[in-house]
Image (spheres, rainbow, N blue to C red):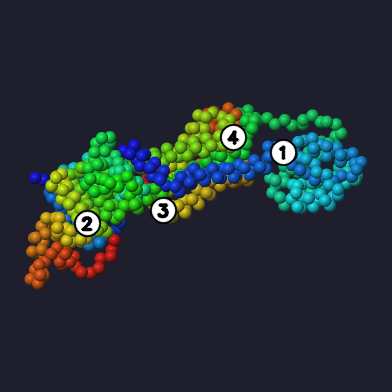
Amino acid sequence: MPPLLETRGLGKDYGSLCALAGLDLEVEEGEIFGLLGPNGAGKTTAISMMCGVVTPSRGTARVDGLDVARQPLSARRLIGLVPQDLALYEELSAVQNLGFFGGLYGLHGAQLSGRIDWALELAGLRERSREPVARYSGGMKRRLNLVAGLLHRPRLVILDEPTVGVDPQSRNHIFATIRALCTEHGMTVLYTSHYMEEVELLCRRVGILDRGALIACSTVDDLVARHGGDEVVVRKANLESVFLALTGHRLRDEA
Amino acid sequence: MIGAAIRKEIQLVLRDRGTLISLFVMPLVFMGVLGSMFTGRQEKHAPRPIAVHLEPGSTRAAAAVRAIEQSGLFRAREEASAERVRRAVAAEEVVAGIVFPPDFDPLAGRPGELVIDTAAPPEVRGPIEGALGGLVARSLAGVELPPVLVAKSPPGIKPAVAEASPFQLYVPGSSVLFGFFLALTVGISFVHERRSGTFRRLLAAPVRRPLVLVAKLVPYYLVGLAQMAFLFGLGVVAFGMEVGGSPLALAVLTGAVVFAAVSLGLFIASFGGTERQVGAIGSVCLLVMGLLGGCMVPRAIMPASMQKFGLFTPHAWALDGYYDVLVRAGTGLTDIALPVAAVAAFGLAFALVGALRFDFER
């Protein structure tokens, strides 16, 4: 079966700065794929090109065979982006936010109402759905941010650090939602996070980006076996030790 | 998609008290204050008091005072001495005074003394000096002279409506000034959308990029039309402003003005920056444009060079058009074709440059 998401030599330059050199990646239909990398590694740039927000300097990104740059409208219909920022209108209620984002994908009338009900249920926000989002807690906003990208039932969901700043309850709720997206709705998830344990928990396969290049891509078990180093002997190696072994221990402050 | 965008932006505007106040309340305050200031000065043509002193038995001076009284422009307030006249003017009890010498005879080289603040601006001093001089000169003829000049508009220029009030200047002045402040609201809305990340969601949706801009601008165009309809409506109902010309011409001109304001918002947004930068720099630019364009001080009383300079702003063209539609009886759409075209051209230029400069991926 061909991969749902496929990038070939996908790269982006900002002037003389190479943000992403040339990414070759394949994400299979129905899987939760983890994309890791330190700050400034090129994760957000890669995601932005995959969903058509940023135009690539070179290479291609295809979703279900559709070139995101050449067939942007058809390709974007298949993608649901959940940005790292809380991309919501805080003055509006959850229902109003979802109504607008659903409208962007051509949903209206009874279909839109049904999808809004479904999304509110999924986010656990039904009871406070008419309140302005500004009154929500951080976890509630994160859950709404997540479901706002799912209204049109995309085949590929791109989650850019969806659990930043949330409490364990909301994080668990988000995890359960992501698993349900795959198992119950057949969606494919590309998941980025700084939290290694999250990726280890959710994803079978992981790609590690560093300095604009994909330096490792395999199953979590394979990466731990190959790059866990001495920690395998001392204590059970995990994805974090692999990540640090591959990307180094120095601080990464570049944007 | 446009429908969803209109609904969303209008919901946001309705929840933003600051925007509502700046778009709907501030112009009212401005037009109320400015219009009332100048209405108060006219007091519906009440004669202005003038202090006069004349010696008993001076027939020429008495005739001059009679002529001043009969003009309906001034009311002569007789003072006991020349010194009292000068003190009254110095104390600003009256705007001017006349001291007639005992042997008042201008033809023999013995003129009266016009007591007036010679440092007053020419536009204040000139009409008073001219009117009083003319009245006194006519009184010297000794007979009732027929009118020597009759005012008539030249062909192609429509006459004024009978009761043109200062509000006919200051309602459009304030409406245009604050109507263009919509550009700030639009510019800040783009910046806010980028900062909050919602713009990424818009770009990730299956919508063409030009349509993203249109979907942001159309709702504000409707808000702008509502704002202008509210302000002009209130001008008519609350301030008694008359519309001397065609309502269609007024509507078309207003449509062009709002188009230019919204396009200016896109132009501002194309420069990027933070909300604070856009708010601070944009409001100063809009105030200067409004000042040059005659929103606060009519261009007609500006020096000729400033009047021409003002034409580099859409405000000036808009106010020229509004002046004709509101003040000149029977003005139709064709009569204001030039101002409408000029304002629309500004709008088109702002929109084109804004759209070309707009960096979606910033």
Query: What residue type is disc 1 on?
Result: Ala
Crowd tier of the residue under label 4, counting other residues whose Cα lies within 10 Å: few below 14, some 14–19, many 20 or above: some
| Alpha carbon separation for disc pair 2 and 1 | 77 Å
Number of the label disc, if any, that sits on residue A7: none
| Alpha carbon separation for disc pair 3 and 1 | 50 Å
- Determine the chain carrying the residue at label 2: A
Earlier sequence position, callout 3 versus callout 4: 4
Residue that badge 1 annotates? B46
- Determine the chain carrying the residue at label 3: B
Left or right relative to B18: residue A246: left
For discs 2 and 1, the disc positioned in front in the rendered view = 2
Which secondary structure, mark 1? loop
Marker count (numbered): 4
Crowd tier of the residue under label 3, counting other residues whose Cα lies within 10 Å: few below 14, some 14–19, many 20 or above: some
Q: Is there CB contact under 8 Å for labels 2 and 1?
A: no
Q: Is there CB contact under 8 Å for labels 3 and 2?
A: no
For discs 3 and 4, the disc positioned in front in the rendered view = 4
Left or right relative to B172: residue B58: right
Residue that badge 3 annotates? B275
- Determine the chain carrying the residue at label 4: B
Residue that badge 2 annotates? A169
Residue that badge 4 annotates? B240
